[in-house]
Amino acid sequence: MDIITVETQPIAGQKPGTSGLRKKTRTFMEPHFLENFVQSIWTGIGGVAGKTLVLGGDGRYFSDRAAQVILRMAAASGAARIIVGQNALLSTPAASHLIRKHGTDGGVILSASHNPGGPDGDFGVKFNTPNGGPAAENVTSKIHAASEKITTYRIMEAQDIDLATLGTKSLGRTEIEVVDPVADYAELMEEIFDFDAIAALFAGGFRMRFDAMHAVTGPYAHAILETRLGAAPGTVVNGTPSPDFGGGHPDPNPIWAKDLMDAMHGADAPDFGAASDGDGDRNMIVGRNCYVTPSDSVAVLAANATLAPRYAGGLKGVARSMPTSRALDRVALRLECNAYETPTGWKFFGNLLDAGRATLCGEESAGTGSDHVREKDGLWAVLFWLNILAARKIPVAELLEDHWRTYGRNYYSRHDYEGVDAETAAALIDDLRARLPDLPGQTVAGQEIEWADEFAYDDPVDGSRAEQQGLRLATRPGGRIVFRLSGTGTEGATIRVYLETEETDPAKLDRDPQEALAGIVAVADAVSGLSERTGRTAPDVIT
Ligand code: G6P
Ligand code: ZN
């Protein structure tokens, strides 16, 4: 088989963002675009000669072609072995697990997470390091630098590798091992949770609906929930991965998983509902007539963690991203364990997990996970909830109420303004940043600003510093507002406004969150001039 060296030149815009390189699928399909980036990954990690990598993704449109290109490029650059999920499928947490389990040199994940797929949707390529987590800044900056200097890439001329049948094949001298994407992951889940208790719960008539949103978790959920745990057939809906996610938006939130929300609020609602995103790392948890915010979810998991066998000995610490509500901090205070506040992006948890400082992590963006892998993990969160419900034997709504009575409630919501003109959005942030020092002491929309700053993070493990990670304001009655621009969009800018107020009065724990937050919403608008600057009267998405 011939290895050919193809002349190319740098293509602008190959800087990995919050989670790998994400672009329109058509951009990835342009000549040399994918190849340039993949060769830049190889360069950025010091070459792949003699190395073992994991490869897989969420099965979105173009994944099958991209996987073949990556295999041929890995072979051309001398990789020893590539472990690839059958049909190039691997959920992100399952890929992370395989990287760790086999002690590989990392892996390439093909996904744009919760963004829609298809020829007009999005595509993405992410490199994960040997710890199983998304590459940190020091690696992604090398990849980006390589993409700016590239002149050639190497690729093998070969027939497509059969990725549909399991087993070991070869591509030149590179071994290609096609593995069942589910088996190892399911085994790991069985080690973490009390499968007997969950199976007994289902055997007792507990009903659940898991919406895989036509994405990668379908096969995992069928195998784990229905086959291993005995949930009734039909528990898993939209369980066959499709290249364009059934034309939908595979983001598990109340807007995009509206079918699930409706089912959970209907007359015949099951006991428990959950959904996961395109690549299986996000989760949404819903009880009967009761949506659980991701910020509350991680707090509940922390408070009840010892009910799951893996965490029975307690938590070393917990971590949340800065915009995530401080409900988790309240639990940490009681548990007397460390609580870390990191910038948005799962990669910032990596050092804390590796150093054994944190066991459990969570983000408002529907991500929850632990030190079992180095990615957030959708099905893991769902199984954790099931484990807790099996042990506590009360409905989700009651569990939440009990939690709020014990710890207080952090009313929380995120308001997103999508497709905003990039300059308008940047100017809004810049102007507010400039005014931050003057805000403390001022009264805005009836609330006094207590303090205001721009979040920066000093990593306690490697000493690195991340700046400009969101503008935050605290108000006197215990409110908090965070302004941040999304780092994952592919078009225009998305302004995210994160809103929170704390409530400990037992008589005020069951209010409608939007109503409870109305005051702080008014402060956010007045202080930033958001509606005036963008011409928007309401957010596009409320989570
Ligand atoms: C990805 C990352 C998450 C992060 C999220 C933020 O999903 O994996 O860790 O929280 O992006 O997205 P944003 O659009 O707010 O930058
Ligand atoms: Zn995802």
Image (tube, rainbow, N blue to C red):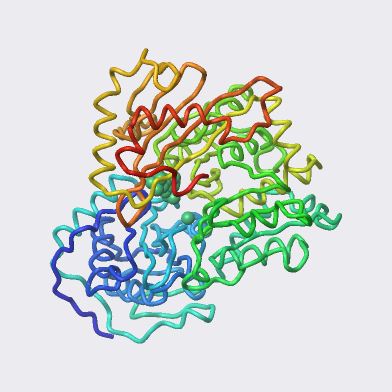
Q: Position of residue 111 (x, y in %)?
A: 42, 62
- Position of 11 with respect to 353 (left or right) is left
Identity of the residue drawn at 16% across and 70% down: 152
Q: Position of residue 22 (x, y in %)?
A: 34, 59
Compared to 520, does 285 lie above or below?
below
Identity of the residue drawn at 37% across and 12% down: 441
Q: Using the image as rendered, state which of residue 44 and residue 80 is in the foreground.
A: 44
Identity of the residue drawn at 29% across and 35% down: 429
The answer to whether residue 330 of the structure is visible from this angle is: yes
- Position of 491 with respect to 273 (left or right) is left
Identity of the residue drawn at 41% across and 82% down: 161
The answer to whether residue 131 of the structure is visible from this angle is: no
Residue positioned most to the right: 204
Compared to 333, does 497 lie above or below?
below
Q: Position of residue 226 (x, y in %)?
A: 73, 65
Q: Using the image as rendered, state which of residue 19 and residue 356 is in the foreground.
A: 19
Quadrant occupied by the N terminus: bottom left
